[in-house]
Image (cartoon, rainbow, N blue to C red):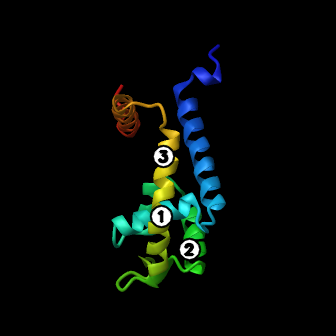
Amino acid sequence: MEKLDSIIFYNIDKAIRTYRNYAQRQLKANGFNITIDQWLIIKAILENPGITQNEIGDLVFKDNASITRIIDLMVKSEYVTRKPHSEDRRKTHLEVTDSGIKIIKDVQNLIENNRETALKGISKNEMEIMNSALITIAKNCLNPKK
């Protein structure tokens, strides 16, 4: 029977979870009042104007209830505004506020340092191979062919 640490998907999940925990600790240790999930959602809104909450959930791998809860917290923190959609009452229009844009800019150096720490000792070639392999895994799972 194979051991957990020999299963690639276990190691991928462990690496992601370990990195997210590290990155969140770094944000907190440096006095930033934002979570990794909030950062992801703000980036998603900035990069995709007019994006819906469902689309955000798909993009950041979160269910609708989690997205709603995180957006509620960001509205309270004044990082995002939520306004009724002009044509569809079931939808809302999300917009990043000036303080939301500021926090994204303020944490950018820390985010880059976190990535540098996590990727220490990994060559550019290894990064390209790893990235290509991960993209292929995702494609295989989205469009499984037997």
Q: Is disc 1 in contact with disc 3, using a CB cutoff of under 8 Å? A: no
- Going from the N terminus, do you reach mark 1 or mark 2 first? 1
Which residue corresponds to mark 1? 41
User: Residue 120: x percent and y percent?
Assistant: 49, 36
Please tell me whether mark 2 sits on a helix, a strand or a loop. helix
Q: Nearer the viewer, residue 95 or 50?
A: 95
Q: Is disc 1 in contact with disc 2, using a CB cutoff of under 8 Å? A: yes
**Vertical side of 98 occupied by 31: above or below:** above
The reply to whether residue 97 is visible in this rendering is no
Q: Nearer the viewer, residue 124 or 96?
A: 124
The dot on residue 115 is 3
Q: Nearer the viewer, residue 123 or 142?
A: 123
Q: What residue sits 50% from the left and 63% below the top? A: 107
Please tell me whether mark 1 sits on a helix, a strand or a loop. helix
- Going from the N terminus, do you reach mark 2 or mark 3 first? 2
User: Residue 119: x percent and y percent?
Assistant: 47, 38
Kindly report which numbered mark, 2 or 3, lies closer to the viewer in this rendering.
3
